[in-house]
Image (cartoon, rainbow, N blue to C red):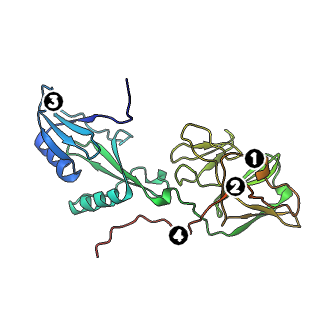
Amino acid sequence: MSLDGAFSHLTIEVSDLDKSEAFYRDVIGLDVLGRNLVAENRPTSLLAMNTRQRVLLVEVPDVPPYPASGGSIHHAWLLNIDQFIRARDRLEALGYETGIDPRQSFRAVGEYNMDIHDPDGNRFQIQAFGEEATEVLASGAGTVACGRIEDFPVGSVTRFAEGRFFLVRNDDGFLALSAWCTHKNGITIWQKESWHFYCPFHGAKFDRGGCYKGHMGCAPLRLNPVSIGGDGTVSVDTDRFYARDRYDPAQAVAPRPGAEFDGTGLEPLTVSYDKPTPRKRSHG
């Protein structure tokens, strides 16, 4: 059997076909194809998305109530940012609250979301990712003096919140790993008990060299340049970032005064200094 990576239709049980059809047509923006077009012994309404998929509403005597705790049971639509803005404007014009997001604290930078419920309480997540989700974001901290060589024993991982990086001391020397996840712009944390960096936003994991471990195909964590002064002070330039496709010992800076990061063979990245904010449609 051949798979094309898409689904055919989504079936939703509703208690009032007229009311639900109006919601999915006027609020969500689907096109009504007709009533009772499928082999079903209950009243139905078939609606079309603009992606060839269908939504089938089936009228039943009782719709199971949505869990009072909210939970994670829901359907979702992923839009581009312009579609998201138009959807938000339409929902607000119809009197819907678009700021509802029960998982706001888990959203990465550039990840926009709003929740809406149909007449029977079924929860729908409307989501989009802006350009900010993949931009290289500078902290604005400039060059950070981290401490002296002897302050960081081999095997140590030290978080610098101001500069949004981790200073790692391994057998090869020092690495400054950007804390920004390379999947989407979530901030990673160091889980010492598991010896890996973890992004709580979408579950990405990276080893101590900053290399991704999993099946999402993420690039390694980006590098900030490390330099060591003549007095042994370790400094990190948080205004510069380098991309790589793997870890190489040459990326580490030797633990000796005067040693500096060598970006040969790595990709210097363009940095964004603007603080990301949700984009609004102009009504001029």
Of callouts 4 and 1, which one flags the residue occurring earlier in the amino acid sequence? 1
Q: Tell me if I can see residue 99 in this picture.
A: no
Is there CB contact under 8 Å for labels 2 and 3? no
Q: Amino acid at mark 3?
A: Val
Residue 111 image offset from top left, x and y in percent: 44, 55
The quarter of the picture where residue 262 lies is: bottom right
- Nearer the observer, 156 or 204: 204
Q: Indicate which disc residue 153 carries.
A: none
Residue appearing at x 35%, y 38% in the figure: 73
Q: Secondary structure at mark 4?
A: loop
Q: Nearer the viewer, mark 2 or mark 3?
A: 2
Q: Nearer the viewer, mark 3 or mark 4?
A: 3
Residue appearing at x 23%, y 50% in the figure: 28
Q: Amino acid at mark 1?
A: Asp
Residue appearing at x 38%, y 30% in the figure: 3
Q: Amino acid at mark 2?
A: Leu
Of callouts 2 and 3, which one flags the residue occurring earlier in the amino acid sequence? 3
Q: Indicate which disc residue 248 carries.
A: 1
Of callouts 1 and 3, which one flags the residue occurring earlier in the amino acid sequence? 3
What residue is disc 3 on?
Answer: 38
What residue is disc 2 on?
Answer: 266
How many angstroms separate mark 2 from mark 1 (CA)?
11 Å
How many angstroms separate mark 2 from mark 3 (CA)?
57 Å
Q: Is residue 124 above or below residue 143?
A: above
Q: Is residue 33 above or below residue 110?
A: above
Q: Nearer the viewer, mark 2 or mark 4?
A: 2
Q: Residue furthest bottom?
A: 284
Residue 24 image offset from top left, x and y in percent: 20, 47
